[in-house]
Amino acid sequence: MRKKERALALIECLKKEYPDAGCTLDYNEAWKLLVSVRLAAQCTDARVNIVVQGLYEKYPSVEALADADVADIEAIVKPCGLGHSKARDISACMKMLRDDFGGKVPDDFDALLTLPGVGRKSANLIMGDVFGKPAIVTDTHCIRLVNRMGLVDGIKEPKKVEMALWKLIPPEEGSDFCHRLVYHGRDVCTARTTPHCDRCCCAGVCKKVGV
């Protein structure tokens, strides 16, 4: 099975299994997703969703968070780990949104990359989830699964995986496909245990099981 054919088949399998899959970070404004995705580094989305409640209660806007003392931000986000660097990035990011973008999150990929603490993964997440534009979010689940399933061959670098997937995944499917990989990676194609291939909806098209 060629990679393009396999990719389309995997999209359909995952779409049937996880029809409503979406971002597992809670947010109702674009800037809040920027904050949450920075906090999610080396932390679970579930914990981030709890921690940000206190952050937004105290600092309910871009302007309020931009004006906040970094030490105060750090005290709140510390349970997410790497509190100092995350607080510093969040503060600098909010200041830049306030000063350079009128308090709004830009809908341009390259502009997003200029924001402190925002890399390609975060920028793609914003582009896909907030603005509904084509996006490929290469998080750890995505990288692990597309290697196992046979869409890429031993590629671990996020940007290289992203570039390879742009050639295989239809643009309108990329964002949802990556969200579904997260769900599948957590529940079935797991990292810390043997993958549960016996109950995998993709077994018929996954390279790992010999197709």
Image (tube, grey):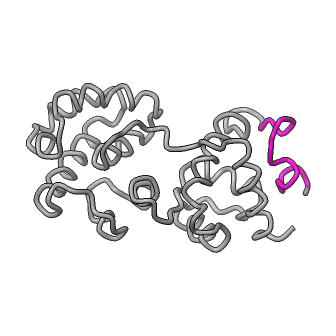
At x 67%, y 42%, the residue is 18
Q: In the displayed structure, does residue 64 sit left or right of residue 161? A: left
Q: In the displayed structure, does residue 147 sit left or right of residue 54? A: right
Front residue (pair 30, 117): 30
Q: Identify whether 142 is placed above or below 196.
A: below
At x 71%, y 48%, the residue is 14
* Residue reaching furthest to the right: 210
* Residue reaching furthest to the bottom: 167
At x 39%, y 59%, the residue is 131
Q: Main secondary structure of the magenta part?
A: loop
Front residue (pair 75, 25): 25
Q: x%, y% of residue 106?
A: 28, 63
At x 35%, y 45%, the residue is 33
- Please say whether residue 197 is one of the residues in the magenta stretch: yes
Q: x%, y% of residue 203?
A: 85, 47
Q: Quadrant of the C terminus?
A: bottom right
Front residue (pair 171, 116): 171
Indicate the quadrant where residue 100 lies: bottom left
**What stretch of residues is rendered in magenta?**
195-210
Q: x%, y% of residue 127?
A: 41, 60
Q: In the displayed structure, does residue 49 sit left or right of residue 16? A: left
Indicate the quadrant where residue 50 lies: top left
Q: x%, y% of residue 109?
A: 37, 68
- Please say whether residue 205 is one of the residues in the magenta stretch: yes
